[in-house]
């Protein structure tokens, strides 16, 4: 049966209606979901009916039953887990990506998506101040972007000692020492585990989570054989940046590969305000970030960048008779997927709509909102800001661990804003991650009021 335009029209019209309804509700709705997963599941986990249902009716049912279980992540009052919102241009372009339904793997098969993503890659490298000749791949998120960078590092480390990873695998290979700051993110641990490299050797960090150069020197001196160093642009709790120049110079002197996990903090590089904190960032070998965090494109979209483009293609490329390869290089040669949607198109759309000045303004606005939240909350009696607010992260204590947990639970129960609990530097904390482009002064004030209410409710 040949598909006709009208086969899609009614369903897409209903999807548009429900999407607009959802987006318009974000300024006033509670951020917290109104139903738990088991309650939502009662509507969906039913026996599959025998006959077909009109697609538009399916969309109405989907939106109606899902709505009570949706978290207001795109809201300007959502500050949990470093999750961004979605810029209008990025959301609309993502609709087109779904409608076009291109498998963005080969330049020959999908020249439009490949060309758009390559333009986005050029803009990213320019804005972030990274080598223009780098290879860029669009992954599901920062975990897989870390995987890509570390996989390239694994190959280079073993190439340097004459081990053919592609032919012989890891079994019997020289052990690779991986060093990472004591406060590196769990996504680095996950990527290392997927790569068969085991846990990183932790290197002492300071009270803001930055890797200590003196401890790194000792760790590098103690390492033997191939080595990878993982640095961090944006500590999960403090937002702090590792001392890139000093750390990379030490690693370079010992022939180590340097990877930077910059899930949200790599975007600070677009602004001159952070130039001193990011000095030397461009000297690393690979970098990982999320576009669905600070840049505010829809899930899912990570960005993996490797300075040696040929090495990246060598690690992830494949050659078989049925593929039509492009001498320029194909998108699938830079990520661990043969099939994927064109994730880079919303990145292009976001950057095209923002421009250089708008991208800088977005990043600086997020950091400014974090500082204003920290200032307003620290003025409340009994609230202590535990970190130096250097980017978009704020960690609060309300005195004892027990009271901090109580206030956090009261805040979540209130539902007007969302901030997540954590544990940092041996203390329970309420962690704020400012990541949404739409957060404004009204949201900041409402969030401070919500914390004030939670403190009163906690007693």
Image (cartoon, helix red, strand yellow):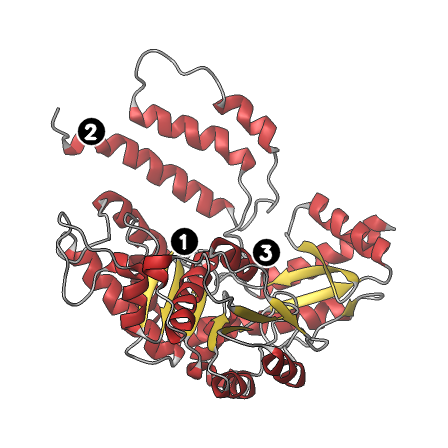
Q: Earlier in the sequence, mark 2 or mark 1?
A: 2
Q: Quadrant of residue 118?
A: bottom left
User: Mark 3 = which residue?
Assistant: 81
Q: Using the image, tell me which numbered label, if any, was put on residue 199.
A: none
Is disc 2 in contact with disc 1, using a CB cutoff of under 8 Å? no
Quadrant assignment for the N terminus: top left
Q: Earlier in the sequence, mark 3 or mark 1?
A: 3
Please state the total of marks drawn on the protein image.
3
User: Mark 2 = which residue?
Assistant: 7
Is residue 362 depicted above or below 103 in this figure? below
In this rendering, which labeled residue sits more in front, label 3 or label 2?
3
Q: Quadrant of residue 369?
A: bottom right
Q: Is residue 290 visible?
A: no
Q: Earlier in the sequence, mark 3 or mark 2?
A: 2
User: Mark 1 = which residue?
Assistant: 140
Farthest residue, direction front: 172
Residue 263 picture location, percent across and down: 50, 65
Q: Quadrant of residue 388?
A: bottom right
Which secondary structure lies at badge 3? loop
Residue 249 picture location, percent across and down: 51, 88
Badge 1: few (under 14), some or many (20 or more) residues near its Cα, within 10 Å?
A: many
Which residue is more in the foreground, 27 or 273?
273
């Amino acid at each position: 049966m040949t598909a006709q335009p009208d086969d899609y029209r009614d369903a897409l019209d209903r999807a548009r209606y429900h999407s607009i309804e959802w987006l318009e509700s974000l300024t006033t709705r509670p951020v917290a979901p109104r139903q738990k997963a088991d309650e939502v599941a009662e509507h969906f986990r039913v026996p599959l009916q025998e006959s077909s249902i009109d697609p538009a009716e399916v969309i109405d049912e989907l939106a109606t039953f899902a709505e009570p279980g949706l978290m207001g992540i795109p809201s300007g009052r959502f500050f949990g887990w470093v999750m961004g919102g979605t810029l209008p241009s990025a959301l609309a372009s993502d609709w087109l990506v779904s409608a076009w339904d291109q498998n963005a793997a080969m330049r020959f098969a999908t020249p439009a998506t490949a060309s758009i993503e390559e333009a986005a890659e050029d803009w990213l490298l320019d804005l972030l101040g990274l080598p223009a000749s780098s290879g860029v791949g669009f992954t599901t998120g920062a975990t897989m972007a870390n995987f890509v960078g570390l996989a390239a590092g694994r190959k280079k480390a073993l190439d340097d000692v004459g081990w053919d990873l592609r032919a012989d695998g890891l079994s019997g290979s020289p052990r690779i020492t991986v060093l990472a700051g004591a406060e590196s993110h769990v996504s680095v641990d996950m990527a290392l585990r997927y790569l068969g490299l085991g846990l990183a050797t932790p290197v002492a960090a300071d009270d803001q989570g930055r890797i200590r150069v003196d401890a790194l020197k000792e760790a590098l001196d103690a390492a033997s054989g191939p080595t990878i160093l993982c640095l961090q642009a944006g500590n999960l709790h403090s937002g702090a940046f590792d001392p890139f120049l000093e750390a990379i110079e030490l690693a370079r002197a010992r022939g180590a590969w340097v990877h930077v996990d910059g899930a949200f903090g790599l975007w600070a590089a677009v602004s001159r305000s952070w130039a001193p904190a990011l000095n030397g960032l461009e000297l690393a070998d690979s970098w990982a970030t999320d576009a669905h965090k600070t840049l505010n494109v829809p899930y899912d979209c990570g960005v993996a960048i490797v300075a040696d483009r040929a090495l990246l293609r060598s690690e992830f490329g494949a050659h078989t008779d049925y593929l039509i390869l492009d001498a320029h290089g194909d998108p699938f040669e830079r990520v661990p997927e043969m099939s994927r949607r064109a994730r880079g198109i919303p990145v292009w759309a976001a950057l095209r709509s923002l421009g250089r000045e708008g991208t800088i303004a977005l990043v600086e606005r997020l950091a400014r909102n974090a500082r204003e939240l920290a200032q307003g909350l620290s003025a409340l009696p009994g609230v202590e800001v535990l970190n130096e607010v250097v980017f978009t992260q704020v960690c609060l204590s309300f005195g004892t661990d027990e009271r901090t947990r109580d206030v956090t639970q009261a805040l979540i129960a209130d539902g007007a804003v969302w901030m997540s609990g954590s544990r940092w530097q041996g203390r329970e904390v309420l962690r704020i991650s400012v990541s949404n482009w739409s957060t404004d002064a009204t949201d900041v004030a409402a969030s401070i009021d919500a914390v004030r209410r939670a403190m009163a409710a906690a007693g």
